[in-house]
Image (cartoon, rainbow, N blue to C red):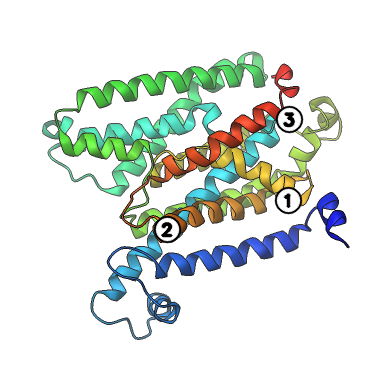
């Protein structure tokens, strides 16, 4: 098949998955080799990776510790990118619109607010009430998850009135929750300006961070990504049928309400865990599923979900590695980098899909 035919038909899902997996492995090796303090040769990085995974002889001195930090950061970047992209693919399939994203429900904003409240309370603002507890990753993760789940309650109350889930109502409720969470977060930041450390932590969380990720956080992220991908594959066929219309899907035996609720919960869980681990990183869930569709020229959700998880993880990991390689000493937060990449693409999508906006 020639280049023109490949462009018209798109890549086969298996070929695309293999290419993305190889890219992810290459950038994982790059993440281990490149970074502050010192760079490692690929052979050194592979030897340190073997020591971390199989208990072989570790690198000398502090080199093994440095490589361990880089490995956790790389795995966190891949897992967070995969969760955000998978969440976006599920929401776009549910809404039938390529402009949907995890932030549309306000779940990311709710998770960020929950994490910020824990940071402020434990880190200084309410330390006297909480007895000076350490701001451990477990508390921050729990706060983010609670914040995300609390956002879902008014969404379901508004959009599920009358026993039927209304997509326009859900979108409008999500916009309202985004505005409410943004206002509360701004108020919290204003109240904590006098405490430099707390204000700095809140600022970092607002723009995302991949520094100092713990083993527990990385394990949680990878586990949620794997479980949610398995759950997404279970509803992939139903999402394909919903694309033909709710009435037709129901006639073919699809429990439309149950599929919608399950998909929303999966997307919300993915976005909440991503924010809990790395803070707010926007546009991944919007851009990646659209690029996967352009790459494969396929609309069925089973390959789309798998490829979106792979591509999202690879994208966030790649941007982190390339930034450290070509902009050493400049600490651009991942949320900032993805905004610089994603905002122009979002404007392009708005222009390209301007005809579809009338149906929202």
- Secondary element under disc 3, as helix, strand or loop, is helix
Q: Which mark is first along the chain, 3 or 2?
A: 3
Quarter of the image for residue 238 reads top right
Q: Which mark is first along the chain, 1 or 2?
A: 1
Residue assigned mark 3: 256
Q: Which mark is first along the chain, 3 or 1?
A: 3
Viewer-proximal residue, 211 or 215? 211
Give neighbour class at mark 3: few <14, some 14-19, many 20+ (Cα, 10 Å).
some
User: Distance from label 1 to label 3 (Cα)?
Assistant: 29 Å
User: Distance from label 2 to label 3 (Cα)?
Assistant: 48 Å
Q: Are marks 2 and 3 in contact (CB under 8 Å)?
A: no
Quadrant for the N terminus in the image: bottom right
Q: Tally the marks.
A: 3
Give neighbour class at mark 2: few <14, some 14-19, many 20+ (Cα, 10 Å).
few
Question: In this rendering, would 254 be left or right of 1?
Answer: left
Residue assigned mark 1: 295
Between tags 1 and 3, which lies in front?
A: 1
Q: Is residue 14 something that shows in the picture?
A: yes
Q: Which mark is residue 326?
A: 2
Task: Residue 23: give x, y in percent of width and height.
Answer: 59, 64
Question: In this rendering, would 97 be left or right of 31?
Answer: right
């Amino acid at each position: 098949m020639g280049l023109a035919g490949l462009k018209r038909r798109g890549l086969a899902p298996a070929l695309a998955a293999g290419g993305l997996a190889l890219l992810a492995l290459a950038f994982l090796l790059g993440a281990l080799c490149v970074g502050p303090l010192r760079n490692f040769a690929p052979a050194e990085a592979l030897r340190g990776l073997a020591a971390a995974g199989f208990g072989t002889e570790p690198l000398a001195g502090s080199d093994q510790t440095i490589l361990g930090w880089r490995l956790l950061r790389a795995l966190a970047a891949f897992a967070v990118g995969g969760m955000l992209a998978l969440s976006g693919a599920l929401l776009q399939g549910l809404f039938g619109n390529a402009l949907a994203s995890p932030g549309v429900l306000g779940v990311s904003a709710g998770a960020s607010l929950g994490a910020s409240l824990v940071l402020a309370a434990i880190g200084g603002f309410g330390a006297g009430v909480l007895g000076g507890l350490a701001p451990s990753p477990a508390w921050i993760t729990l706060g983010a998850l609670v914040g995300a789940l609390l956002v879902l309650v008014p969404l379901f109350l508004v959009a599920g009135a009358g026993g039927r889930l209304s997509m326009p109502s859900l979108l409008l409720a999500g916009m309202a929750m985004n505005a409410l969470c943004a206002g509360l977060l701004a108020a919290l930041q204003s109240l904590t300006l006098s405490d430099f450390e707390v204000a700095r932590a809140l600022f970092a969380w607002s723009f995302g961070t991949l520094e100092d990720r713990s083993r527990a956080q990385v394990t949680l992220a990878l586990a949620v990504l794997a479980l949610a991908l398995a759950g997404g594959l279970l509803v992939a066929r139903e999402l394909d049928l919903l694309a033909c219309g709710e009435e037709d899907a129901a006639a073919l035996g699809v429990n439309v309400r149950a599929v919608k609720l399950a998909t929303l919960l999966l997307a919300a869980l993915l976005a909440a865990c991503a924010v809990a681990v790395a803070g707010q990183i926007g546009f991944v869930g919007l851009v990646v599923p659209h690029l996967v569709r352009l790459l494969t020229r396929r609309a069925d959700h089973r390959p789309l979900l798998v490829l979106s998880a792979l591509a999202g993880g690879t994208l966030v990991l790649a941007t982190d590695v390339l930034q450290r390689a070509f902009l050493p000493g400049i600490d651009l937060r991942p949320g900032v980098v993805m905004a610089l990449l994603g905002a122009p693409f979002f404007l392009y999508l708005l222009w390209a899909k301007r005809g579809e906006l009338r149906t929202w």
